[in-house]
Every structure is written in structure tokens, then in C-alpha cells.
Image (cartoon, rainbow, N blue to C red):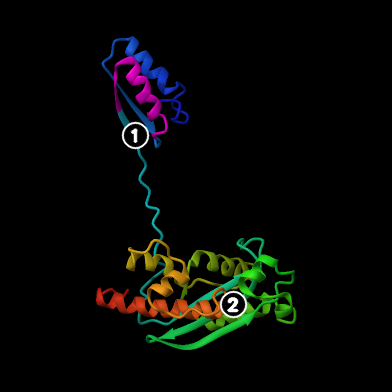
Amino acid sequence: HSQMSAMDGMTPVSELVKRAAKWGHKAVAITDHGVVQAYPDAMSAAKKGNIKVIYGIEAYLVDDGVPIVSKAGDKTIEDTFVVFDLETTGFSSKNDKIIEIGAVKIEKGKIVDRFSEFVNPERSIPDKITELTSITDDMVDDKEAIDKILPRFIEFIGNSVVVAHNAAFDVSFINKNCKDLKIEFKNSVMDTVTLSRFLFPELKRYKLNVIAKHLGISLENHHRAVDDAKATADILLKAFEMLKEKEIIT
């Protein structure tokens, strides 16, 4: 190991190669832990010392794939789905607040209901968020806070599969606020970003507007919750058609 192997090596790779050449070895094998950072220096040292370097690596294989559906259970594409989107004051579910919840409900392949409410964050909305969403302080000042609106949204969801585009972000805010309000939230969650990566590997980006354009889906008022939720629902319905063609229903 070279010094690039944390906790297992302290000698620079150039010194290792030089020492092996001095001892008369014709070759030296180097196997670092999870990195190849030292190997350009090893190559240079090998040329100077007229010695061969055998390159190796101790690699770590990790199953870091993100599931399309978490807590799937026995759900199928024939179940009820609630596709939702949030607008927030920032990116941290710990420090930032929800300012809008938008959702549509899908039953038997059709949109049958919708939910759309502003939320008073009880703080000023940052200018950059207003610029992105067009939501101003005046639009939320007279609205109810999350402690009143979230229970209604959870009731709207019921036992449905919850769907969002980049679900980890939106669900993190729901989880945080449900925890604060002692509301149970254990629904199955589907991510249309991960689903889109599976169905459309030819795309280079998977932002909502990119996928909507790819599928010919209208996306008006982007970065407004109910409009983004509607576009995501349309993407989901087209995805369901493709999954049925592949005979995938669970």
C-alpha cells in the first residue's frame, strides 16, 4: 500500500518504487484501498527506475441504487396514487418551511381529485424563492400554518401511494412536519425521477420540465405546486402505459 491507503500505508508511492528497484526487483505490485490517486506518480517512478509496476486496487462494491418505490408492499399500478409537489422557503427540511402544497389523485388511470393550498410559513419568503415560484409574502400571510393544513393533506392522501418528482426532497419535508405534529405517515413512496431513469435511459437530465418536454406533456406555471404535480401525474400515467407494455404492474 502507498500513503494513499488510509490507515494502512505511510510511504509515498515514488519511494516504494525506488526502494523495490534498489533491491533489484523487476516488478512491484501496489494495491491501494479504493483509490488510484498514486498511480501517475508510480508510473513516473517506474520509468526512472526501469521497473514494472503492477497496478491493483481494493475495491468496494456498494448497492447504492435508489428504489423506484420504497415501502412498496403489495401495491400495483392499479392502486390509488397521490402525486404531489411542495414549494418551500429553501432546501433544508430541518430549517426551511413549506409554503405551498399541490397534489392530484389518480384512480384507475384517471385524475379524480386535486389538493392545492398555500401555507403560511410564519416567516418572510426569501427573494430568490419568490423569483423562482412567484409566491410572495402577501399571498401566504392570511393563510393557515402547516399545523392546520398538513392534517388535511394527510387525510387527502389516505392509504394511497405517494408520488413525487425527486421524492426524497418533498417527502423529507412531509416526514419532518409529521414528526413535529405527531402525525403518522407510513405510505409507500414512488419517485418519478428514478422511474424516468429506468424508462428513458437516453436522456441526459431528468428535471421535470425535461421529461415533460420529452413526452409532449404541458407544463404551465413551472415551480407552482399543483401545476408541477399535474405534470408529474401526466408523466406517471404515460409511464404506467409503458410499464404495462413491459408486463410490469407491481
Residue 218's disc number = none
Asked whether 53 falls inside the magenta stretch, the response is yes
Q: Position of residue 173 (x, y in %)?
A: 59, 67
Whether residue 122 appears in this view of the structure is yes
Q: Quadrant of residue 189?
A: bottom left
Q: CA distance from mark 1 to mark 2?
A: 48 Å
The structure residue drawn at horizontal position 40% and vertical position 36%, both measured from the top left corner, is 35
Q: Quadrant of the C terminus?
A: bottom left
**Residues drawn in magenta:** 36-54
The structure residue drawn at horizontal position 34% and vertical position 10%, both measured from the top left corner, is 22
Which callout, 1 or 2, points at the residue further toward the start of the chain?
A: 1
- For disc 2, the marked residue is 101
Q: Is residue 201 above or below residue 188?
A: above
Is 215 situated left or right of 122 in this image? left
| Amino acid type, residue under disc 1 in the picture | Ile
Whether residue 191 appears in this view of the structure is no
| Amino acid type, residue under disc 2 in the picture | Ile
Q: Quadrant of residue 65?
A: bottom left
Is 181 situated left or right of 7 in this image? right
Residue 57's disc number = 1
